[in-house]
Amino acid sequence: MSNLLTEDFEPSSAAAWKQKIQFELNGEDYKTLLTSTNEGITIKPFYHSDNFEKLEIPVPIEDFKICQYIIITAEEEANKIVIESIKQGAKSLKFIVKKSFNIDVVFANILDKKIDFQFEFSFFSPVFIAELAEKLKNETVYFNIDIIGNLAKSGNWFKSLNEDFKNLETIFKPNTSTCYLSVRADIYQNSGANVVQQVAYAIAHANEYLTKFGGNVADKIQFNFAIGSNYFFEIAKIRAFRYLFNLILQEYNTNVQPKVFAQPSLRNKTILGAHINKLRATTECMSAILGGVNTVSSHPFKLKENNLNPLILLKESGAQNIATDSYYIETITKQIAEKALEIFKDIEKSGGLLNQLKEGTIQRKIKENAQKEQHQFNTGNLVLLGANKHPNEYGTLKDLHINPFLKGKSYKTLIVPISPKRLAEKLEQKRLENEA
């Protein structure tokens, strides 16, 4: 950062700055300006080169890509949306797939255009995935199969532990550039895990696959993160993850640049705040970009209106990874990495992520932090504009065609599922009751 300084200003030490601050505080203790976060990270009023330590973090060489979500309901309609998205400049497309579809119809006239094809499946069919792989064998493809993520989110395997892992083995083709696996770290964020927990669980999650398949599978994994509204912490979160994943891979005698996909968090979105949701999604996407993700997209959640069109970012932001050498971001990154590594080591000592999911430890830790955040929201210490501060007085929830608070049918699970939950839900439920 020395290039930002000029010879017009004499350099000052950290001690001199601290002394000046205490003088301006009329003798009050400097510690009154320190802030402690839910992660146990202390934020200082200033950061200085005197106590600055930089981590060597591998960052992507290529520019980030903007991804457009496409929910496949009717094949011909999906194909039209794909063609239009490509015309608008999309370089990555993510298909939300709830059942098998006519592959030839969906991908008609859209191949060989240097587009990344991403998938998010609600089912796991090795036969269907093999057909897709054959159709897209000359394309860049991310199948995002995450059997552990499905267990964490739903409480069950697709079939069983042994059968799911066996099915994974049948679809692997090591000599292709296709990414078959995914680590759905967004599950943890959307359910209330703090940034340190998210990084630790993402690494432990990936380590289950590395332990099973070996270090060679590292370049077949795409990591999916949800990005919250704590702007600088979210930048640091992605950087800390990249640092730790590189550290873990050394144990497997391999070195891979992790592929990271990011989208805005669901947790802080509101039903009546469509415009504020767009603003939050914009800053969250910027955090992801500055943190060094490979692909970024707005999420497909439709609370009332469509959210931010991610292509706007491509046209207007011109964003680059400028977080390197920022004293504040680098310091937070180091603290997140250190604390996440401690959690990761504890998880591994207790038998790994799968074992802690079975015992309910991961679920309990996330719930504890989620309850802490919920209390902060309820008391106004955690502010969501349009919800618990300056609420939208003009919208009405009773105009919604579907009650967003209806719960699905209960079913038997092997473990307690990790369920996403928005902070504003109870507040919105109360408002709906008052409108009735």
Image (spheres, rainbow, N blue to C red):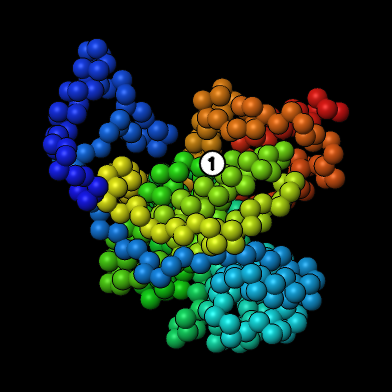
Identify residue for label 1.
Answer: 192
Q: Is residue 192 left or right of residue 22?
A: right
Which residue appears at 68% of the width and 66% of the height?
70
Q: Which element is circle 1 on?
A: loop
Depth check: give the residue in front, 160 or 171. 171
Asked if residue 403 can be seen in this view, the reply is yes
Identify the residue at the far top of this view: 26
Give whichever of 289, 320 is nearer the camera: 320
Image point (59%, 74%), residue name: 117
Q: Is residue 358 left or right of residue 341?
A: right
Residue 82 visible in the displayed image: no
In the picture, the quarter occupied by the C terminus is top right
> Residue 23, position in %: x, y?
21, 17
The residue that appears at 33% across and 46% down in the rendered structure is 329
Is residue 110 found left or right of 65 in the rendered image? right
Q: Quadrant of residue 207?
A: bottom left
